[in-house]
Image (cartoon, rainbow, N blue to C red):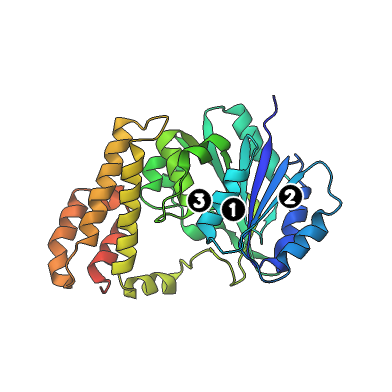
Amino acid sequence: MALSVSVALCTYNGAAYLEEQLLSIRGQSLPVAEIVVSDDGSTDDTLAVLERVIADWRGIDVVVLRNATALGVTANFEQALAACSGDLIALCDQDDIWWPERVERMVAEFTRRPELQMVHADARLVDAAGDPLGFTLLQTLGVSDADRAAVHAGHAIDAYLRRNIVTGATMMVRRELVERSRPFPAAWVHDEWIAMVAAVTGLVDLLEEPLTDYRQHGGNQIGVTSLDASGKLGRLRAPRTARNARLLARAEALQQRAAGFEPAASASVLALIDGKLAHERRRSGLPAARPLRVAPIMRGWRAGDYSRFGLGLQDVLRDLVQPV
């Protein structure tokens, strides 16, 4: 039996780009069965654009949820995902453009591999006008060959505990993964959490081909952080307290939930998660005085924790120099 596909599309003041995105969904080589639109209290013409574009659509069920009070990105996506009825769910931003084969290409992977829980892909970065910027999402994120290889080999957890490399706008998931992931912890962003749950409890994979134009226009609710030299220098100058508290809260939430997942996580994965939590506790507890940080940081480096649970020397430098 063919797998049905729902689209979880979240909107917020997205009138400028929404029509182009909707038409790209409508133009898929393999049609979707359902679009669930969850609008987070838009004050522009977003809903008017939606109603005009879908007025004469046939063959696609469209469900529109309207939030009188804004939920925020993560809770809004949780609401949209929970309302989807398809076997597979594609996450969708309001301002991107899907390539015509996106759905067909991803459904083929799920059909071929029944054990697959999630697949994500690369994307072409474009500007506000939709013109290519000359690089892809994975390039911009600096996804390493080692991380790509870990995901392909069925060890995505090894990559994801170092850093997030999954962007929701490129994801498709099985509906049961969404059910397993809920409720989404407050400390996590929706796509990162779903990806982590998928890696802890099952198999995920990465398609290294672009299937989406990922628009960067300055108004993105979640966009691509600059990874050039100035961006890296800025992060070294940024205060560390709030960021490290956030990383610790995420590790705590994951550790608390991981033992209760079904299907159950393996003992080795649970041990890795415990190690990640211990590492973030040590980082969060580093002294304010930089000279006093050196010894505990070097112990973590010699133990391999900075490479196992982070970006290696990049994080060592960050922990050594960032102000409180």
Q: Residues under labels 2 and 3: Cα distance?
A: 20 Å
Q: In this view, does 317 lie to the left or right of 224?
A: left
Residue 169 numbered mark, or none = 1
Residue at numbered disc 2? 25
Say what secondary structure mark 1 lies in.
helix
Say what secondary structure mark 2 lies in.
helix
Q: Which amino acid type is marked by label 3? A: Asp
Q: Which amino acid type is marked by label 2? A: Ile
Indicate whether 222 appears above or below 56.
below
Position in image of residue 253 (x %, y %):
34, 49
The quadrant in which the N terminus is found is top right
Indicate whether 22 appears above or below 291.
above
Residue 191 numbered mark, or none = 3
- Can residue 236 be seen here? The reply is yes
Q: Residues within 10 Å of mark 2 (few under 14, many from 20)?
A: many
Q: Residues under labels 3 and 1: Cα distance?
A: 9 Å
Q: What residue do we see at 24% from left, 52% from top?
A: 279
